[in-house]
Image (spheres, helix red, strand yellow):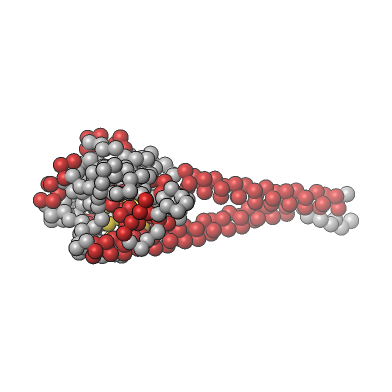
């Protein structure tokens, strides 16, 4: 007698094919999401770069910064004095506050707080306290929750000044001015140009799941870099101190820098701050830079996004399995 319906092996094959299609579809969607977020992130940094140049034009050359104390330049701060009305007045940001320098762009240039949020992080733009409040009612970002990018430390030490460090118009095109947030990981100071791509990934920004970072350079162009050793002479853009290669001999330097929180040491030393996933940063001595570094893990928003994709995958697989079971039962009933 001729039997109707599907054999069990047919159902198994169908399930595996369906699962493979779902897997490839999710991978394609994730890839498109990554490409889209990188593109939007690059557009944000381009806006920030244009706002910096406009600020520099209005102020005869210097890039934005608030209260500067060269005597304590080895102790940069961030996210202080956010509720002050005057970024240069009493109760305003502490001396050498890097995030306050970026915030000046919101107060003086035609740029919105959404430009300071990388779309891959899921963070929310700063609302200045809500209601009718504007950027002029605040003096700084309150925390890393409203800032996805790091900015070249505009508060050099006297030693760096003596060696020619200036954050002004006309920077070298290879100098990193801003980028996706500094991860602040302990691995940063160990990175050298002789390491593998996998090893160098441990120092990448967390904004794009550790794949790399968009970087704004001195001439205004943006590049997505797969390693933090992407500044002048392969300088580590997330640390202070000598790193990358020696500009005179082109020999690899033995470390990735001296630390994370500190002053640049010379004209080619980009030190992008603040670090990600921290609240207000208090002044910290060079010897204790590790105290303010962030854990080398995904930000909560990215963990949530990853969990969401996993949930979707489980639901789709569950639906396919349920459909397969229904077909199997129907086929089994027809055989009887």
In front here: 236 or 293? 293
Q: Is residue 175 above or below residue 325?
A: below
Q: Residue placed farthest to the left in the image?
A: 162
In front here: 205 or 197? 205
Q: Horizontal and vertical percent for residue 291?
A: 30, 35
Instruction: Identify which residue is drawn at 13% across, 54% down.
Output: 164
Q: Horizontal and vertical percent for residue 38?
A: 42, 59
Instruction: Identify which residue is drawn at 42% across, 42% down.
Output: 297
Q: Horizontal and vertical percent for residue 27?
A: 53, 56
Q: Horizontal and vertical percent for residue 314?
A: 62, 47
Instruction: Identify which residue is drawn at 53% across, 59% down.
Output: 28
User: Could you tell whether 29 is left or right of 201 in the image?
Assistant: right
Q: Quadrant of the N terminus?
A: bottom right
User: Could you tell whether 154 is left or right of 278 in the image?
Assistant: left
In front here: 29 or 145? 145
- Asked if residue 14 can be seen in this view, the reply is yes
Quadrant in the rendering for residue 172: bottom left
Instruction: Identify which residue is drawn at 77% across, 50% down.
Output: 326
- Asked if residue 126 can be seen in this view, the reply is no
């Amino acid at each position: 007698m001729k039997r109707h319906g599907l054999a069990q092996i047919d159902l198994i094959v169908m399930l595996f094919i369906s699962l493979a299609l779902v897997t490839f579809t999710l991978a394609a969607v994730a890839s498109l999401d990554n490409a889209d977020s990188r593109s939007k992130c690059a557009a944000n940094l381009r806006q920030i770069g244009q706002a910096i140049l406009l600020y520099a034009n209005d102020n005869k050359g210097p890039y934005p910064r608030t209260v500067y104390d060269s005597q304590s330049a080895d102790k940069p701060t961030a996210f202080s004095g956010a509720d002050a009305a005057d970024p240069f007045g009493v109760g305003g940001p502490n001396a050498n506050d890097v995030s306050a320098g970026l915030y000046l762009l919101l107060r003086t240039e035609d740029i919105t707080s959404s430009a300071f949020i990388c779309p891959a992080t899921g963070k929310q733009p700063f609302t200045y306290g809500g209601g009718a409040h504007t950027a002029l009612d605040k003096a700084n970002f309150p925390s890393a929750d409203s800032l996805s990018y790091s900015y070249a430390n505009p508060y050099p030490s006297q030693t760096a000044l003596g060696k020619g460090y200036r954050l002004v118009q006309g920077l070298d095109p290879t100098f990193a001015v801003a980028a996706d947030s500094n991860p602040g990981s302990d691995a940063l100071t160990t990175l050298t140009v002789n390491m593998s791509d996998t090893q160098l990934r441990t120092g990448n920004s967390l904004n794009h799941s550790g794949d790399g970072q968009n970087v704004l350079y001195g001439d205004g162009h943006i590049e997505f870099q797969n390693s933090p050793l992407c500044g002048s002479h392969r300088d580590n853009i997330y640390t202070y101190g000598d790193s990358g290669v020696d500009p005179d001999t082109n020999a690899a330097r033995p470390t990735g820098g001296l630390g994370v929180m500190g002053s640049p040491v010379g004209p080619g030393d980009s030190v992008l701050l603040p670090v990600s996933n921290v609240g207000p940063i208090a002044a910290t001595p060079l010897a204790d830079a590790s105290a303010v570094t962030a854990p080398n893990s995904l930000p909560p928003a990215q963990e949530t996004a990853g969990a969401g994709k996993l949930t979707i995958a489980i639901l789709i697989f569950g639906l396919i399995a349920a459909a397969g079971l229904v077909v199997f039962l129907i086929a089994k009933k027809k055989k009887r």
